[in-house]
Image: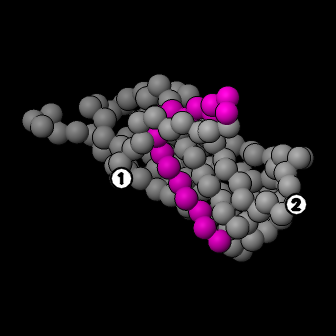
Amino acid sequence: MKIAKKIFTLVCDDIRLEIDGKISLMGIQDRDLVVDEIPYILPSLAIMISLEEMQTETSEINVIVKAPKVEAEQLKFVAPPDKAKDDNDAKLLVKLTPFRIKAEGEVKIQIKLPDAKKAITIHSFKIVQSDPLD
């Protein structure tokens, strides 16, 4: 089942919803998340998921973040009741505070609808420990 025609994901250090409705993204991450040492604790990890032209009606979307050797975080988003019927776009703002890193490896960001049998991975990135000689 296709959730949306287009799905965009940004991973950053922080997300702020401004008074005027704008979204501010701070510290946008590159392809890999490089840390000096493992284990490591980031003060926060923020994820913005933009679902454009949603293909299915739902009252709930689950976002699952799976990191190596850490219990998966599962967050439930409920569709806002005042959402316009002709607006089939959605933005999900996720903030994990703190974000614990216990091992190098792949982090998967997944979406799952309540009736779906399995989640779909919409974004992934690697956690890498920097070389001490760099």
Q: Is residue 6 above or below residue 103?
A: below
> Quick check: 36 left or right of 58?
left
- Asked if one can make out residue 83 in the rendered structure from this viewpoint, the answer is yes
Residue type at mark 2: give it. Answer: Lys
Q: Position of residue 91 (x, y in %)?
A: 67, 50
Q: Is residue 78 left or right of residue 41?
A: right
Looking at this view, is 82 or 32 the one in front?
A: 82
Q: Which residue range is magenta in the image?
A: 5-20
Quadrant of the rendered image containing residue 131: top left
Q: Quadrant of residue 93?
A: top right
Secondary structure that dominates the magenta span:
strand
Q: List the residue tagged with mark 2.
A: 85
Disc 1/disc 2 C-alpha distance (Å) = 36 Å
The N terminus lies in which quarter of the figure?
A: bottom right
- The quarter of the image holding the C terminus is top left
Q: Earlier in the sequence, mark 1 or mark 2?
A: 1
The residue carrying mark 1 is 31
Which residue is at a point 73% across and 66% down the rendered structure image? 54
* Residue 10 pos. (x, y %): 50, 49
Query: What residue sits 51% from the left and 33% below the top?
Result: 14
Q: Amino acid at mark 1?
A: Arg
Query: Is residue 13 a member of the stretch shown in magenta?
Result: yes
